[in-house]
Amino acid sequence: MEKNILTSRVTGDSCIHVKHPSGLDIYICEMKGFSTVEALFGTKYGSINTMFRTSGDADYTTVPEGIAHFLEHKLFENEDCPVFELYAKTGASGNAFTSFDKTCYLFGCSKNYTDNLRILLDFVQKPYFTEENVSKEMGIIGQEIQMTNDNPEWRVFFNMLRCMYHAHPVRIDIAGTKESIAKIDAPLLYKCYDTFYNLNNMALSVAGNVSADEVLAVCDEVLRPCEDKGLETVFPDEPDSIVKPEIREKQHIGTTIFHIGYKCLPCSGEERLKKSMAGSLAAAILTDASTDMYVKLLESEVINSTFGAEVFCGDGYFTVIFSGESDEPERVREALLGETERISREGIDDRIFRRIKRSTYGLLIRELNNVDSVANLMINSHFEGVAPYDAIDILSALTADDITNFIKNELRSDRVVLSVIEKDGGSQ
Amino acid sequence: MEFKRTELGANIGFTSIIDEKFKTCSVYVRFATRLAPAEAAANSLGIGALSASNSKLRSVAELNERLSSLYGSALGTFTRKRGDIQILGLSASWICSRYSLDGEDIEGEMLDLVRDCLFSPNVQNGEFDATPFRITKNDLLDHIDAEMNNKRSYALERASETAFAGESAECPCYGTRKSAESVTAADAYAAYLRLLSTAQVEIYYVAPEPNDTAAEMFRREFAAIERHPQKFPFRAVSPAKSEPVTVTEEMDVLQCKTVLTFKSDSDDIYALRVLSAVLGETPVSKLFLSVREKLSLCYYCSSRYISSKNTLTIDSGVEKENIEAAENEILHQLDEVKSGNVTDEELENALLSMDNALAAVGDTPSSYSSWYFERFCDGTNTDPQQQAALYREVTRERVIAAARSLTLDTRYYMLCREDNA
């Protein structure tokens, strides 16, 4: 097993990458002086992976919405005992999450990390689904769905995605619906597990107070070699256009919130990282508190300090989202359309570009200052198909023209969606 | 790690925490004062205005431009409630100068900025400058309105209003919307001057290398302020009502929220804290295993112990038709502890989880600052290892006694409106 040292040319930080004989990609960052350990064992399988096949399958399988998340819940149930009982013996804090494009099982601890790593690697490789335990989970996940449906931030985001994407499964809720999860049964869970929980489709990321040799020794002991089954996931054809430009919903909330999303063209690998960095800089420039647009909106009380932006992207989707609280979100949209048009025409002020680039560099340095964020950075980078420190290198190569071109080509006025959750004064 | 606390003046503490593993430096300045309905909003706005501008950077735009040019340095203010005390503060953080690309002294520039925001605010004729103040005030009003957006935290706040009725802790940490609306720029500045003069001030500097200029700057600036510090108890035990009070609120929600608040007459805060962990702070706690895993009634059912009010709160999100079943099970699990049904395993699991959390203190600058500030409020000087040892001394009998000391004080229900249920 060869240990590849990955080093940041800018900061000197480094981590280790190993391609384990079992098929698993392993990332380890020994962080001197830190007490905690954060480990994530993840699979490139999220809510968008609803259609797939392996080299042995004749046809594609289509699965119910929310099954990746359901599987995550059920994997915590071992044949012998619930996984949380195992972590309870070591004191670790175990958890898991399912996103659009991955599912990760994780623990954080400050003691006994090799024992915890053994638990983590072992239980994720040992599914145990029965009709009884699947049925039991319906009520719990049903409540999770209800809780998220009461969350206006969640609603405004998914309403936006549904108006943006015609067919891509990024438009569906990660947990599915009460109706969709009712179609899930044990054989279907095993089918998904056997397809996606193959070590060739997975990665392990461990950061903090660890020794690489100790981590690898546990991996050697616990990992069971997997044959690469030639997994293939497919997505429905997605047009470049949006579904509709605006959606509004009322909720019993105190402030009206909005998302303004630009649908951009998707891409993958290093190209996506570069585009994502350009998009992040464009978003930071457009929400920079010193610009005329921001000052006008703020001083006229159209926005408040919650106004911000982010890039949201993955396999087959790429958006830049501007969000905040406002009673007049259409004025925010109007201002953004005007500003993107102006920048497309005049270009970006080089002074602002250099300042925002420097600010972004500072944020990337901060990311390396924390055990959790380093562990997440390593696994996210792997699933994105890039190395953990590539972002800083790519940032340093970006020019003002790159950002102007991103704004001109990607933030198009015919691909904007405004999603609003309006406060409903209601009657109390 | 090197820890050193010095007194810079009357009730002004400066704690330096030097830990070479960090790539950033951070400053946290906290003002502690009594939470009073008449002053809460003005205090909050007085502190809030400090991060909108200062006498040199006179607008939100100028201040933010400066921060982003300093490699995305952060500067913000905060207000929170700790029992009957209002904690207000300013925090700032920046990457160490060794990471600057052109050799800038980020540290020096940021300490100057912190100084200007705190001690040279944007004030004319005895009031905060109108435009940045108006922006700060709008932000606060929106923030108060937005509290309803998060139904879980809103339910907990509404329960605490009833549980602590007649006590300072009844007041929302920012004051009410009505009181905030009436605060003028002059009121807010007067409130800030009052904080500078009377509040307990605790400052934390967390960095990879010592820098005496930070302490010197604060010492010099506070020396110019006439101090009349007022001390308030950080712990004010809340008495239980003679009968539990029930508050019901109907909202357009899909999931109902329940909050049960219990008051304790025991001084054994370590046992109460362990009790909360056994009951509902981990995935192997009694409430998680029974209400969620066994009965599948909810996604979360958690407990928390608030030592400053000697109160234990249990909250959950459930379907309307399951509220009674969930509440019965919560009370049953508490009765189980009261009657002695706590296994050694449950106790050990809770302690291991607490050990783990305590050992993590110090892996982020904010965890250092929060830890030592909380200990200051507790009037102790324990480090996390010493605190863990105190929890380890808690016996099963003490946990049972802690459970028996609880009296149900308040029930809060957020119900789905009928047409939503």
Image: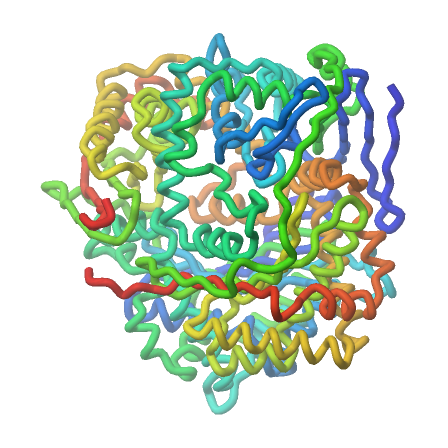
Q: Nearer the viewer, residue A209 or A223?
A: A223
Locate the C terminus of chain B and report the quarter of the image it occupies: top left
Q: Residue at x 29, y 70 (%)?
A: B38
Residue B197 appears anywhere in the view: no
Position of residue A413 in the picture relative to residue B101 (left or right): left
Query: Viewer-proximal residue, A315 or A366?
Result: A315
Q: Residue furthest top?
A: A80
User: In the rendered view of the protein, which quadrant contains the N terminus of chain B?
Assistant: top right
| Residue at figure coordinates x 67%, y 66% from the top left | A411
> Residue B322: x and y, percent?
22, 33
Rendered location of residue B214, percent (x, y): 68, 62
Of the pair B288 and A179, the residue shown nearer to us: A179
In terms of image quadrants, where is residue A13?
top right
Q: Give the residue displayed 68% in from the left and 63% down from the top.
A: B73
Task: Name which quarter of the figure residue B122 lies in.
Answer: bottom right
- Hey, which quadrant is residue A388 in on the image? top right
| For residue B253, side relative to residue A122 (left or right) | left
Residue B183 location (% of width, % of height):
35, 78
Rendered position, A235 above or below A332: above
x and y percentages locating residue A294 in the rendered image: 59, 76
Rendered position, B290 above or below A407: above
Q: Residue at x 62, y 58 (%)?
A: A310
